[in-house]
Image (tube, rainbow, N blue to C red):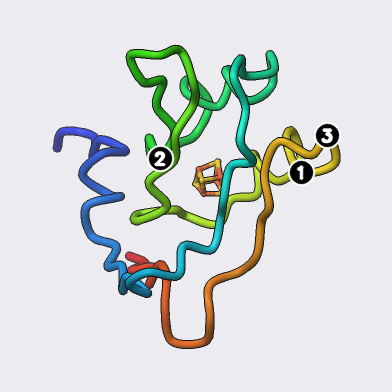
Amino acid sequence: MAATRVEEKLYQNRYLVDAGRPHIKINAHTKPSDNLLAMTKLCPAGCYAENSAGQVEITADGCLECGTCRILCESSGDIVWNYPRGGYGVLFKFG
Ligand code: SF4
């Protein structure tokens, strides 16, 4: 039997978007810090991306709440991180 790919496992999860209330926000910047820029490679859900102006943007839909960006970027003031409101966010499917 072939091994299941991580992407296929992640596809099983469901996500309820809290429209207009993203639980992670990036503070305004002209040039991203090294940590913030690293998130474009590190976020397992691919939420972070660099735009054409070289700034980092986030689309928090699909966030797995792993906390990687919180550890790397919250204390430095790059982002504001909160858990989604109750009932919103990722719904993990195990098995
Ligand atoms: S908590 Fe994890 S999954 Fe969510 S945006 Fe941060 S790095 Fe990505």
Residue at the left extreme of this rendering: 1
**Spatial distance from mark 1 to mark 3, Cα to Cα?**
5 Å
- Look at mark 3 in the image and give the residue it sits on: 76
Q: Judge by depth and name the residue closer to the eye, 83 or 77.
A: 77
Query: What type is the residue that disc 1 sits on?
Result: Glu
| Residue 79 screen position, x and y as percent | 67, 43
Residue 4 on image: x %, y %:
23, 39
Q: Is mark 2 within 8 Å of ligand 1?
A: yes
| Residue positioned 49% across, 21% down in the render | 55
Q: Secondary structure at mark 2?
A: loop
Q: Which residue is mark 1?
A: 74
Quarter residue 94 falls in: bottom left
Specify few, some or many for label 2: CA neighbours under 10 Å numbering under 14, 14-19, or 20 or more: some
| Corner quadrant of residue 81 | bottom right
Using the numbered discs, state the Cα–Cα distance from disc 2 to disc 1 in whole angstroms: 16 Å
Mark nearer the N terminus (2 vs 3): 2
**Which residue position is annotated with label 2?**
47
The crowding category of the residue bearing disc 1, from other C-alpha atoms within 10 Å (few below 14, some 14 to 19, many at least 20), is: some
Residue type at mark 2 is Cys
Q: Is mark 1 within 8 Å of ligand 1?
A: no
Please, what is the three-letter code of the amino acid marked with disc 3? Answer: Ser
Q: Residue at x 35, y 54 (%)?
A: 62
Indicate the quadrant containing the N terminus: top left, top right, bottom left or bottom right: top left
Asked whether disc 1 touches disc 3, contact meaning CB atoms under 8 Å apart, the reply is: yes
Q: Is residue 78 left or right of residue 91?
A: right
Examine the rendered structure and indicate whether residue 18 appears above or below residue 27. below
- Compared across the picture, whether 60 is left or right of 19 comes to right
Mark 2 or mark 1: whose residue is earlier in sequence: 2
